[in-house]
Image (cartoon, rainbow, N blue to C red):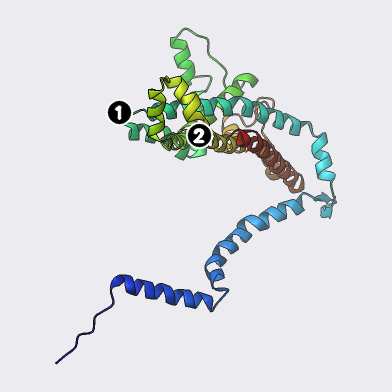
Amino acid sequence: MTSEVAMPTKPARTEERRRALGRFRAGRPGFGWVFTAPAVALFALFFAYPLLASLLQSFLGRRDGQTVWVGLAQYRRLLADPQVGTALANAGLILLVQVPVMIGLALVLAQVLNQSWLRFRTSWRVVFFLPAVTTLVAYAVVFRVLLTTDGGVVNQLLGWLHLPPVDWLNDPVWAKVAVIGSVTWRWTGYNVVILLAGLQAVPREQYEAASIDGAGAATTFLRVVLPQLKPVILFCTVTSTIGTLQLFDENFVLTKGGPDNATLTPVLYLYRVGFQQLDFGYAAAIAWLLVVLIGVLSAVQFAVLGRRS
């Protein structure tokens, strides 16, 4: 007479392995560091060290060909540098115009894409998101070709409409318009996708309840949808603000910061100081001014929009 030994089932074997792994971890308190060490090392090497090194660099300067400690001299120089003021004013103007226009346009497009009657919605999402994955320099070069005064596509269209050509890249006002337009074209689709995800998270039952109560489309959006969408709008606003203050590629490729510094931005000025004039201490000070400015603006936006959310 033979007896058969029942093999343990798969869930039982899985549970046994889990318990064995738990006992192994309990006997080795530092076991988790084995897995986190690569991430910590990469963070320290490529983020923490450069951050601290740039902070130290901002307190250094060059005298008689030697690197010396200058204390707060670089930051005092910031306060007296008119080009820093020009760069901040340009960035502030672009920020105040471009971010609200982009977020508003993205919200309208996301609302349209969220409608059930729209056909090929997935294809439209891809079309709107494509600019966000286009190489920065490539799309800036395309805009430069489109906006060229002689032979540019935009001026050709204006000619067909019997309108005078516009010197898009050499006029201080129109150069800002060109930069704002290019940035809006690139990042609107990204914000559309984010806002669309927020719209789709609103329960369908709430739309039905608002319809039963007699609310129209505008009232439903303002009273039901928009309050739930405020955290998503806050995210888009903060990230767009940070991105706008870090503008470089568009201004560098389209106008080189001109004409007459009309499109000079803090990062573009940092590039000039650090990589053309090789004044790394002052460039580091400009970078830290930008860090503080972004932190303050982000905190204000969180305080205002976050509280309302």
Looking at the image, which is closer to me, 242 or 209? 209
Density class for disc 1 (Cα within 10 Å; few <14, some 14-19, many ≥20) is few
Question: What residue is disc 1 on?
Answer: 119
Density class for disc 2 (Cα within 10 Å; few <14, some 14-19, many ≥20) is some
The image shows residue 45 at horizontal and vertical percentages of 62, 60
Foreground mark, 1 or 2, reads 2
Looking at the image, which is closer to me, 222 or 213? 213
Which residue sits at x=43%, y=10%? 160
The image shows residue 255 at horizontal and vertical percentages of 60, 29
- Residue positioned most to the top: 162
Q: Is residue 240 above or below residue 5?
A: above
Which residue sits at x=57%, y=20%? 168
Q: Is residue 305 visible?
A: yes
In the rendered image, which quarter is residue 183 located in? top right
The image shows residue 3 at horizontal and vertical percentages of 19, 88
Looking at the image, which is closer to me, 75 or 8? 8
Name the amino acid type tagged 2: Gln
Which residue sits at x=84%, y=40%? 76
Work out which quarter of the rendered image holds the N terminus and state it.
Answer: bottom left
Work out which quarter of the rendered image holds the C terminus and state it.
Answer: top right
Q: Earlier in the sequence, mark 1 or mark 2?
A: 1
Whether residue 140 sits left or right of residue 70 in the image: it is: left
Name the amino acid type tagged 1: Arg
Question: What residue is disc 2 on?
Answer: 228
Q: Callout 1: helix, strand or loop?
A: loop
Q: Is residue 20 above or below residue 66?
A: below
> Quick check: marks 1 and 2 in contact, CB under 8 Å?
no
- Residue positioned most to the front: 213
Q: Callout 2: helix, strand or loop?
A: helix
Which residue sits at x=41%, y=36%? 203
Q: Is residue 138 above or below residue 260?
A: below
The image shows residue 304 at horizontal and vertical percentages of 65, 33
